[in-house]
Amino acid sequence: MTSTINSALWSQYHAFSPHRGRLAAEWLAQHLPLKNAEIADLGCGTGGASLQLARCGSRVTAVDIRSEALQLLETQASQEGLSISIHCQDVLEWRAVRALDAILLWDVLEHVADPSHLLAQCSRSLKETGVLCFSTPNKWSPIHLLCDPHYSLPLISCMQRAAIKKIIVHSLHWFEADKPDIAQLLSWRDLNRMLEKSQLKSRWQIREVAALALAQPQALWNRAWHLALVRRLCAWNIAGPLVARTPQRPGWLSQWLMPTFYVLARKK
């Protein structure tokens, strides 16, 4: 990959992995005891969440297609004496060997070729009392229409994967032609249809996750001006009241305005 206008942003994203990991563990802890829980972290990257969950006593399976990211996770787990089952494979090919208490998909669905299939596979892999926690950017968010969260380009967030690939691979030459995880954003309508098909009932967790993130803004916000704005709002005691007004269910306007969906799903 050549240097792109997003290189610095992605470096920051990787550096903030431990913050996202702590936030993910805190989010899951609101819905199940982490001690001895069987949890799969799919699309785990360098494993911020996997490591934190293992520190909390969970039995973690970490899956990602990027071997270099998994090597970093394996090294860190070994240094801390943590036992994490690590698998280098496409998450679409992953199969759970036993029923799980929880599955985490943090910014993963938009990267896979068939997110509906992945949600169905997650549904089949959960215990009857299990939970699926996922986040994914909103295709129609005005913020993303102006500046896509993956490539920092206007209007690319509403395009299909083939068109995006033509721009970032063939025109701009930012990535190799065989890049497997080009992001295509999803709308709430897309997600709701997939969840229904997978026999999953869902509940928005945007307010809950945002409230947790106020204590560690790097867990959600990576761009410098985003972080500066959130920290200023916190200093002015405005951030908390704003988060408290965040919609807890998908209304017609909130479906368009939410930058990122944070969702808890269970079997019907």
Image (cartoon, helix red, strand yellow):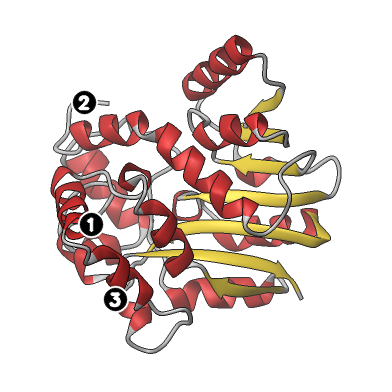
Q: Nearer the viewer, mark 1 or mark 2?
A: 1
Residue at image mark 2: 2
Quadrant including the C terminus: bottom right
Observer-nearest of 81 and 8: 81
Q: Which amino acid, by three-letter code, is at mark 3? A: Leu
| Mark 1 residue element | helix
Picture residue at 32% right of the left edge, 86% below the top: 253
| Marks 3/1: CA–CA distance | 21 Å
| Marks 3/2: CA–CA distance | 33 Å
| Mark 2 residue element | loop
Q: Is residue 265 left or right of residue 10?
A: right
Task: Tell me the tag on residue 257.
Answer: 3
Labels 3 and 1 touching (C-beta < 8 A): no
Picture residue at 36% right of the left edge, 31% below the top: 14
Picture residue at 34% right of the left edge, 69% below the top: 243
Q: Residues within 10 Å of mark 3 (few under 14, many from 20)?
A: some
Q: With respect to residue 174, does 234 lie above or below?
A: below
Q: Quadrant of residue 199?
A: bottom right
Residue at image mark 1: 234
